[in-house]
Amino acid sequence: MSESIDVAVIGLGPGGEHVAAQLAQAGLSVLGVEKHLVGGECPYYGCIPSKMMIRAADALAETRRVPDLGGSSEVTPDWTPVAKRISDEATDAWNDQVAVDRLVDNGGRFARGRGRLAGPGKVVVETADGAEEYDVSRGVVLNVGTSPAVPPIEGLADTPYWTNRDVVKVTELPGRLVVLGGGAIGCEIAQAFARFGVDVTIVEVADRILGPEEPEASEVVAEAMSAEGIGVRAGVTVERIDHDPDAGFTLLLAGGERITGEALLVAAGRRTNLADVGLDTVGLDPSTRFLDTDEQMRAGDRLWAVGDITGRGLFTHMSMYQAEIAVRSILGKDGPWADYTAVSRVTFTDPEVGSVGLTEAQARDRGIRVTTGSYSLPSSSRGWIHKAGNHGVIKVVADADRGVLVGATTVGPAGGEMIGLLATAVHAAVPVSTLRRMHYAYPTFHRAIENAVNELDL
Ligand SMILES: Cc1cc2nc3c(=O)[nH]c(=O)nc-3n(C[C@H](O)[C@H](O)[C@H](O)COP(=O)(O)OP(=O)(O)OC[C@H]3O[C@@H](n4cnc5c(N)ncnc54)[C@H](O)[C@@H]3O)c2cc1C
Ligand SMILES: NC(=O)c1ccc[n+]([C@@H]2O[C@H](COP(=O)([O-])OP(=O)(O)OC[C@H]3O[C@@H](n4cnc5c(N)ncnc54)[C@H](O)[C@@H]3O)[C@@H](O)[C@H]2O)c1
């Protein structure tokens, strides 16, 4: 016997949870389906625990800078409060009861189990007590997110490697950590662990870490990390990985070099959880990596998709942005609909890397007549005053024909905050002439934006 409902949300990551709560509050009968933890990757295994590690690690690093600036300092790192904070404050010991209650309090129903499409307007949930079937009148929202991708390196699958889901549960630090992958996860965790005294090496197959960012950003972050003793090995291929209970991990690189570690974190990208959600039953390709969505987040007839599975940027703020659009679409409201011209993101290394819109290379690939401006943060008044820990660069990318910025990068101690100003500029297509006439308070980090904007050939 099938039950009838208005909307089913399969996967309750940040976006799915938001959609389910909003639609239930609007009076629809909504079923939220989650096989693991309501809230998804971000609160339990992603953004929040990693940023708690980084907050503590940054405090240690800043204290170590005291001798350069005003006295002496002694730092004795202790991971115990970090592990405790992640367990107690961030994840409630990986228990989602509060989030389940929140959904129910908003008027939604909750099913713990694996959800899948079973044809247009039909959903099946495999629960511990068996399969439940639902007829869904208004639509299904998919928000099934991603899992860590594990590269097909010989030997790796048989080793006790960590992914992000393990590293957030670590209570005792290893002496030596190898991080496979120098993307956002790899760089953030590598630096946090290193600041707690772990000997860390990042092993990256591409020719630079933080590949999606501007090359100038990768260079500044690699320099800052190397300066604090983190091994940054880019452009290397790992041919084989072995593990021995006594010797730990050994990575054999092409060329014969070996890199060893007590622990290995695999941070080599993500794969979407789309293989077993029944896409074939609604005429979609079950082997697709990402789901194509229109401006209202529709992926098919009475089918919406939000979050990482749409391939528009694997970020919590993207999942939430799309969730809001899906809610309006399902409720038959008006736009504005999805617009990706000014997506911003921040990698929380020190220096932080903020970016918005297109990189220079992306802008050139689109045939835009590009002009760029950049300014080194240590050369700015504030960077010079800041001294210890002042690594950074501002880069702006402009469309010379339109006289507006199409992208920007802000690397620095407050890089993640500085990008806000430039996100507005790209989003609202503020003329470069206006950006040149603005007031920039002295001596702020963001004042270096004015220097970069003045470098543009416009
Ligand atoms: C270490 C790390 C750090 C990160 N840091 C940041 C950051 O600082 N800022 C930022 O913006 N982003 C960050 N991210 C990315 C962010 O976590 C994701 O973009 C965010 O969680 C949005 O994902 P989502 O909404 O697509 O779903 P997810 O969070 O992936 O959740 C999907 C949910 O669906 C469930 N599910 C899957 N299949 C089924 C099924 N068949 N039935 C029922 N349930 C199912 C899963 O159990 C999961 O709970 C980080 C990620 C990681 C791993
Ligand atoms: N601050 C943030 O917003 C934040 C933080 C962490 C993660 N995230 C999100 O999570 C996503 C996933 O992060 P991620 O770091 O796992 O993925 P990523 O795709 O950003 O980086 C993975 C890196 O691993 C490298 N790699 C792949 N195979 C390899 C191999 N065999 N050997 C060595 N290196 C290899 C890739 O070249 C790449 O540089 C990101 O795209 C990002 O959107 C965001």
Image: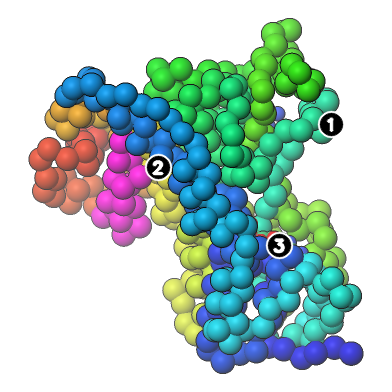
In this view, 146 is above or below 358: below
The residue that appears at 48% across and 43% down in the rendered structure is 82
Residue at 24% x, 35% y is: 452
Between the C-alphas of marks 2 and 3, the distance is: 27 Å
Amino acid identity at mark 1: Asp
450 in relation to 377, above or below: below
Q: Is mark 3 within 8 Å of ligand 1?
A: yes
For label 3, the SS is loop
Q: Amino acid at mark 2?
A: Arg
Callouts 1 and 2 close, C-beta under 8 Å = no
Question: Which residues fall within the magenta stretch?
Answer: 411-430
In the rendered image of this protein, does residue 23 appear above or below residue 16? below
Name the residue: 43% across, 30% down: 77
Report, in whole angstroms, how far the alpha carbon at label 1 lies from the one at label 2. Answer: 33 Å
Q: Which residue is mark 1?
A: 158
Indicate the amino acid at tag 3: His
